[in-house]
Amino acid sequence: MNDEARKLLKFEFLSQGSLGGAEGLAEAFFEVIITRMGASPFMVGLLGSSAYVSNLFSPLWARASRKTGAKRLIVTSLLLASIFLLLSAFSQSALTFFLFVFQFSTL
C-alpha cells in the first residue's frame, strides 16, 4: 500500500469513526424523540431502519468517490450530515424531524 492510499485510509477511518460515534449516540434517542412528536409507528420503523437503508446507496457513493476523489466526498458528506443533524434539532413536526434524520443517516 502506498503512502497516498494509507493517508486516505487513515482519514476515512477517523472521519467515519467520529461520524459513526455521533450517529450511534444520537440514534439511540431518535425513536423516542419522534414518538413524543406524534409520529406513526410506520415512521418510527422507517427511522429505525434508516442506517440500514444507507447500505443501498453504497455503490453510488463508491462511484462518486472515484469521480470526485475520496477525500473531497468524505468532507462533503460529513459537512452535510452535520448540517442535517443540526437542522433536526430545530424541527417542530415529526415529518421534518424524520426527513432531516433520514438524510443524516443515509449520508
Image (cartoon, helix red, strand yellow):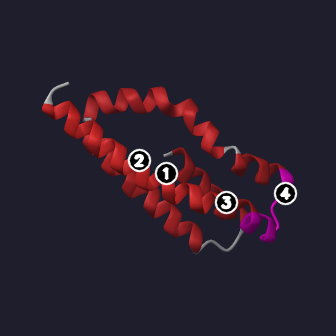
Residue at the image position 59 percent from the left and 62 percent from the top: 26
Of residues 24 and 51, the one drawn nearer to the viewer in this rendering: 24
Q: Label 1 near label 2: C-beta < 8 Å?
A: yes
Instruction: Look at label 2 and name its amino acid.
Output: Gln
Going from N to C along the chain, the mark reached first, 4 or 2, is 2
Magenta stretch in the rendered image: 32-41
| Label 2 to label 1: alpha-carbon separation | 6 Å
| Label 2 to label 3: alpha-carbon separation | 18 Å
Question: How many residues crowd around disc 3 within 10 Å: few (fewer than 14), some, or many (20 or more)?
Answer: few
Quadrant of res 50: top right
Residue at the image position 82 percent from the left and 67 percent from the top: 38
Numbered badge on residue 40: 4
Residue corresponding to mark 1:
20
Under tag 2, what secondary structure? helix
| Label 3 to label 4: alpha-carbon separation | 18 Å
Residue 100 in view: no
Of residues 66 and 32, the one drawn nearer to the viewer in this rendering: 32
Residue corresponding to mark 2:
16
In magenta stretch: residue 37: yes
Quadrant of res 73: top left
Q: Label 4 near label 3: C-beta < 8 Å?
A: no
Residue at the image position 67 percent from the left and 58 percent from the top: 98
How many numbered marks, from 0 up?
A: 4
Under tag 4, what secondary structure? loop
